[in-house]
Every structure is written in C-alpha cells, then in structure tokens.
Amino acid sequence: MLIMRTHVKREPCRRCHILRLFLGMVLGIAIIGLMMGDVFHQIGGIQPIYFGYVFAGLAILTFAVKFIAYQRSRAKQAISDKSDSQR
C-alpha cells in the first residue's frame, strides 16, 4: 500500500527563491518605467562607462579602507606584544 504524506512542510528551494526575486525585480522595474518614464529622459546623458568607474572606484576605496584598518590593528598588536614582553 502506498502511503502519501500530505502535510509536508518544506521550504522552497534556492532556485525558487532566485526566480521569485528575479521576477519581482523585473516587475518592479517595469512598474517604475511605466510610472516615471519622463524622469528617465532627463538622466539619459549618463553613459554606461560611468557605472564601471563607480564600481572600480568603490572597490579601490574599500580595499584602501580595509588595508588601513589592517595596518592599524597590526600596529596596535605589535605595541601590546612589546609591552607584554617587557613585563
């Protein structure tokens, strides 16, 4: 006899989450495009290369901030190690 489980509570799979997110974003962009079409004409002078510059600039800025924070923490650790060794 075949036993069927009817009350199985499973979470949606990862593919379903990704698909739902994608479809929601496409729907949101379509709604924004329909409602605010005239606004997009005003920002039509933006070239796609600007987004590349922004992305690369943010990557370089993030690296610089993390590197400086790493250097400071390493310097503080070296100072604390010296004070511990003198005791």
Image: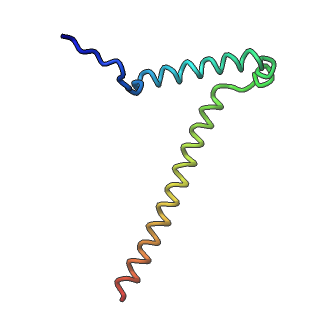
Q: Is residue 66 left or right of residue 80?
A: right
Q: Is residue 19 left or right of residue 24?
A: left
Q: Quarter-wise, where is residue 3 in the image?
A: top left
In this rendering, is residue 66 above or below 3? below
In this rendering, is residue 73 above or below 29? below
Query: Residue at point 37% right, 26% down?
Result: 10
In the image shown, does 66 or 34 lie closer to the viewer? Answer: 34
Query: Residue at point 51% right, 50% down?
Result: 63
Q: Quarter-wise, where is residue 28 in the image?
A: top right
**Picture coordinates of residue 22 (x, y %)?**
53, 21
**Picture coordinates of residue 58 (x, y %)?**
58, 43
Query: Residue at point 44% right, 77% down?
Result: 79
Q: Is residue 72 left or right of residue 27?
A: left
Where's the N terminus, which quadrant? top left
In the image, farthest residue toward the left:
1
Where's the C terminus, which quadrant? bottom left
In the image, farthest residue toward the top:
1
Q: How many marks?
A: 0
In the image, farthest residue toward the front:
1
**Picture coordinates of residue 55 (x, y %)?**
58, 37
Query: Residue at point 55% right, 18% down?
Result: 23
Task: Tell me which colouring the rendered structure shows.
Answer: rainbow
